[in-house]
């Protein structure tokens, strides 16, 4: 049993949003969150040394909504910003999303109702899916999943071993339980590490298909070399937790297959201009900036 019960009629959900130079999207992220304040107690934006207009945009929201708070974390890196935000959060439920995550209208309500219904305290944490927006093939992949994967995609709650950083929720007492166990390394997948720490502490993680969020496709646009380096974080994370079999499977099966997929996906995405909604050979000649590693 967890320390704190969840009441669906009270604001019990804290949102933590680590951010670094996200002036293009942080406004829309916060617009969607502040539209759901019936269930959100606070939105803690953690600035991690932004040099663009991110802070001024967040300050505009803070002036409009008392629930929006901005704190700073000077040590560079997602794990440091994440910890600062999770430590500062006061709600019995803490959701952590990315600053380019776009939540659907029912997101906060669905989370609170799920945990309120978990009166036995079975679930220590939960996460949902992320589907990329702004892709040349639109939502065709999502529609394919919904059509051909049926209820497993749409409604079935199931247990999973890890968390998804763009769309994850922890009970606050669970965070305090694993706080000293999570790794502060920047060359691993911090969300996978956090999820494995939850499991190793005796907690269970629920996958909620009905809280799917939109996520940026920027990682999909990463050059091949940088993508391979980034994905090497996965087996390293598994090795950190002595999951040797899964690390081998990731190294020799999953990552090679994903690299081939990324090559094909990149060939399509590089030629697409999401602003005009059209393809052009000229786009392949444009310089690209890889998304920074956490």
Image (tube, rainbow, N blue to C red):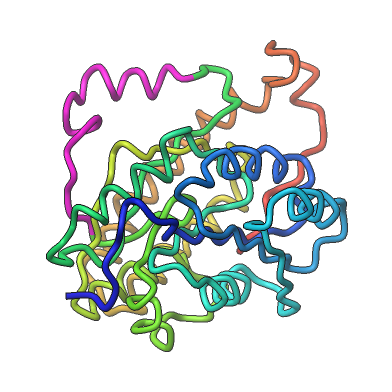
Q: Residue furthest left?
A: 120
> Residue sitting at 42 percent across and 60 percent down?
12
| Residue sitting nearer the eye, 174 or 197 | 174
> Residue sitting at 81 percent across and 61 percent down?
50
| Residue sitting nearer the eye, 30 or 286 | 30
Q: Quadrant of residue 176?
A: bottom left
> Residue sitting at 81 percent across and 49 percent down?
60
| Residue sitting nearer the eye, 145 or 243 | 145
Q: Is residue 220 visible?
A: no
Q: Quadrant of the N terminus?
A: bottom left
Q: Residue furthest front?
A: 9
Is residue 155 found inside the magenta-colored segment of the image? yes
Q: Classify residue 171 as left or right of residue 105.
A: left
Is residue 157 found inside the magenta-colored segment of the image? yes
| Residue sitting nearer the eye, 75 or 31 | 31
173 lies above or below 222? below
Q: Is residue 157 visible?
A: yes
Percent coordinates x, y for residue 162 in the rendering: 31, 61
> Residue sitting at 31 percent across and 36 percent down?
210
Main secondary structure of the magenta stretch: helix
The magenta-colored residue range is: 139-160
Percent coordinates x, y for residue 290 in the rendering: 70, 48
181 lies above or below 157? below
239 lies above or below 40? below
Q: Quadrant of residue 249?
A: bottom left
Q: Quadrant of the C terminus?
A: bottom right
Count of numbered marks:
0
Percent coordinates x, y for residue 44 in the rendering: 61, 63
Percent coordinates x, y for residue 184 in the rendering: 53, 81
């Amino acid at each position: 049993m967890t320390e704190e019960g969840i009441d669906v009629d009270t604001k019990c959900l804290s949102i933590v949003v680590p951010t670094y130079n996200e002036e293009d999207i942080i406004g829309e992220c916060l617009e969607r969150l502040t539209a759901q304040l019936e269930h959100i107690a606070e939105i803690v934006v953690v600035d991690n040394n932004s040099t663009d207009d991110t802070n001024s945009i967040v300050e505009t929201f803070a002036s409009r909504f008392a629930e929006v708070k901005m704190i700073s974390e000077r040590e560079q890196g997602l794990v440091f910003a994440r910890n600062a935000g999770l430590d500062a959060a006061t709600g019995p439920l803490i959701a952590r999303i990315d600053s380019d995550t776009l939540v659907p209208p029912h997101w906060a309500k669905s989370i609170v109702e799920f945990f309120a219904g978990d009166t036995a305290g079975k679930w220590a944490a939960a996460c949902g899916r992320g589907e990329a927006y702004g892709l040349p093939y639109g939502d065709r992949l999502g529609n394919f999943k919904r059509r051909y994967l049926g209820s497993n995609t749409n409604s079935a709650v199931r247990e999973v071993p890890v968390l998804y950083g763009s769309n994850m929720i922890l009970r606050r007492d669970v965070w305090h339980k694993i706080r000293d166990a999570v790794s502060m390394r920047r060359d691993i997948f911090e969300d996978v590490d956090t999820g494995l720490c939850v499991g190793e502490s005796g907690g269970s993680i629920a996958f909620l298909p009905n809280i799917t969020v939109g996520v940026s496709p920027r990682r999909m646009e990463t050059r091949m070399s940088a993508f391979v380096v980034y994905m090497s974080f996965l087996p390293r994370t598994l090795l950190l937790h002595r999951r040797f079999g899964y690390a081998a499977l990731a190294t020799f099966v999953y990552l090679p297959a994903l690299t081939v997929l990324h090559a094909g996906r990149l060939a399509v995405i590089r030629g697409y201009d999401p602003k005009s909604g059209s393809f052009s050979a000229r786009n392949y000649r444009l310089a690209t900036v890889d998304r920074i590693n956490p």
